[in-house]
Image (cartoon, grey):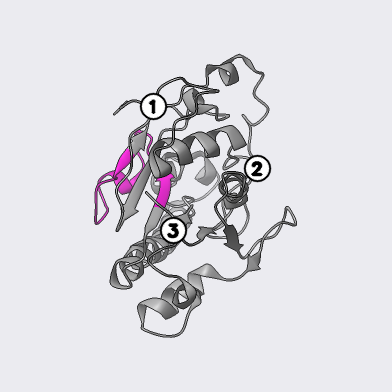
Amino acid sequence: MEIKGKVHCFFEQSGTFKNEFIKLGIPAEDYDIQNNFGETDHKIDLFKEIEIAYEGGASVFDSMTCDDLIMAFFPCIYFCAPSQMNFTWGCINYVNMDTKEKTDAILERDRKRTYFYGLAIKMLAVADIKSLRLIMENPWSENTYLKANFILPPSLIDNNRMMRGDYRVKPTAYWFINAEPTHGYTKQLDKLKEKKTHMTSRASKVAGLCSEDRSMISPDYARNFICDFILGRPQPEICPTLFDAM
């Protein structure tokens, strides 16, 4: 993929990708309602912007062109495998609740999941309608909600992110809209030898906001992903060849 314009990185932890795009010579900015690291370029309610854009109103998407790329790390708090356990009466979170309280908690969680599920779909629809290039990321472990309940299959799945230098295995799916992934494979096994410091996480207390610890991305992984799947660019200093690993 050739990016003649700018990369717009959406949602939490997108700053890691932003910085790696910039190092590779591609202008990039990130957008999020949070600014906990003090580096967010545009502090903005992206959920609201998606709703407005889907209804045809003026939104942040209007300043973007087909020469740009949107990299969206859509919050997975209601789609990921651990969240699925909260939809059973036997969930440990409900151990001191009666049947009515458990059911009310599950129904409320279902309402929130439906809302964010709709936002994810609307975001992809906005990109498609406006002919914008967009990549959406979300987890892809055994019981993730999107596996059986989404409008499109993933364009690619990275089954072991540690092989590209990330902190966790964390199987992850990526949906490409108005774009196709390249298929390189940069191995960076040195990360497997390091002591991992991001193996515990604190849950966010706000609906739609993910745990920062859980969603941390290593700069190495961001660079390797960009070169392997977006730019199709070899990295001789890390891996002598770029070959199809899919």
Among numbered discs 2 and 1, the one appearing first in the sequence: 2
**Where residue 20 sits in the image (x, y, percent)?**
59, 44
Identity of the residue drawn at 55% across and 45% down: 96
Please tell me whether mark 2 or mark 1 is closer to you in this view.
1
Mark 2 burial class by Cα count in 10 Å: few <14, some 14-19, many 20+: few
Mark 3 burial class by Cα count in 10 Å: few <14, some 14-19, many 20+: many
Q: Which element is circle 3 on?
A: strand
Q: Quadrant of residue 89?
A: top left
User: Which residue is at the front of the view, 78 or 218?
Assistant: 218
Find the magenta span and give its range: 136-156
How far is mark 3 from mark 2, CA to CA?
31 Å
Q: Which element is circle 2 on?
A: loop
Q: Amino acid at mark 3?
A: Leu
Q: Is residue 144 left or right of residue 63?
A: left
Residue with the mark numbered 1: 242
Above or below — where is 220 with respect to 144? above
**Where residue 203 sits in the image (x, y, percent)?**
61, 46
Q: Quadrant of residue 57?
A: bottom left
- Does the segment drawn in magenta span residue 140? yes
**Where residue 192 sits in the image (x, y, percent)?**
56, 17
Quarter of the figure with the C terminus:
top left
Instruction: Point out which mark residue 69 bears.
Output: 3
User: Which residue is at the front of the view, 114 or 29?
Assistant: 29
Q: Amino acid at mark 2?
A: Arg
Among numbered discs 3 and 2, the one appearing first in the sequence: 3
Q: Amino acid at mark 1?
A: Leu
Verify CB contact (< 8 Å) between mark 2 and mark 1.
no
Above or below — where is 125 with respect to 193? below
Residue with the mark numbered 2: 202
Please tell me whether mark 1 or mark 3 is closer to you in this view.
1
